[in-house]
Amino acid sequence: MRKAVFYRAAARPAPAAGAVGCCPLLGAVAVIAGTLAIAPPARADDTIKRPGDHPMYPVEIEPHALFGWGGVYGGSGGYGIGARFAIPVVRNGFIPNINNSVAVSFGIDWVHYDFCWFRGNCSANYFDLPATMQWNFFVARRWSVFGEPGFMLFFSSFGDCPPGTVCPNRPAATGVQPAFFLGGRFHLSDNAALTMRVGYPTFSIGVSFFP
């Protein structure tokens, strides 16, 4: 969307051969100093102040790696993979004088939990189906942040638990819980970004694609 602006230093007469031969370092410093002197001052990044000035895309596709935390299963951490999809529904967002947008986000995550006790190993697998409203704020040319309130439907299964092993309570087979995530993106281009999301009960790192 933005066109890069390149500035060209004004032509200068070439220094005398003797001066360059005697003091090449001073000559280089003089050229650099002169270039900086005539270069226009850098303009502050005011992306957040320009409503609607962000890439348009029909869907955001975000595969990611997951890390479970928060003691969901027996106090242990988890790991897994998943994907999110977000469909923009409001380009200019709820605040008309800043650069924000709203999308509907949904996805599927698989998280595996291991719980090692003194006399055995118990595990569980969770399949999470989040559905949220994604409120995006384009704070700079390369950065955007978002909040995602919503809910999550989960399915869980109990793993191996050897006889006589002290194991945590069996997780519920299905359930619904509130969900809230905060995240940010570093935009590599108008079509790709590195995305990080933190919430309960997972933290994710992935790549967003904007076809």
Image (tube, rainbow, N blue to C red):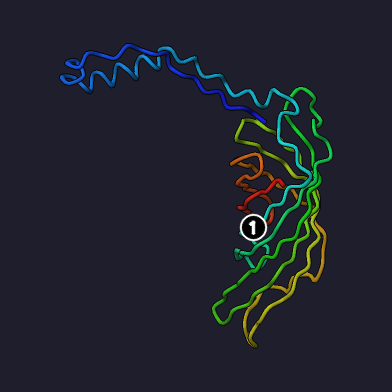
Figure quadrant of residue 159? bottom right
Q: What residue type is labelled 1?
A: Gly
Figure quadrant of residue 142? top right
Which sits in the foreground, 82 or 53? 53
Picture coordinates of residue 24, whole percent (x, y)? 21, 22
Is the residue marked by circle 1 packed among few (<14), some (14-19), or many (20+) residues within 10 Å? some
Figure quadrant of residue 75? bottom right
Picture coordinates of residue 101, whole percent (x, y)? 77, 35
Label tally? 1
Task: Residue at 68% x, 44% y: name it.
Answer: 182
Position of 101 with respect to 185 (left or right) is right
Which sits in the foreground, 164 or 113? 113
| Quarter occupied by the N terminus | top right
Residue hosting label 1: 70
Q: Which residue lies furthest to the bottom in this view?
A: 163
Picture coordinates of residue 35, whole percent (x, y)? 39, 17
Is residue 37 positioned above or below 48 on the image?
A: above
Position of 90 with respect to 33 (left or right) is right
Instruction: Give the SS element for disc 1.
Output: strand
Is residue 61 positioned above or below 24 on the image?
A: below
Task: Residue at 80% x, 24% y: name it.
Answer: 96
Position of 202 with respect to 11 (left or right) is right
Which sits in the foreground, 29 or 157? 29
Task: Residue at 36% x, 14% y: name it.
Answer: 34
Task: Residue at 57% x, 27% y: name it.
Answer: 4
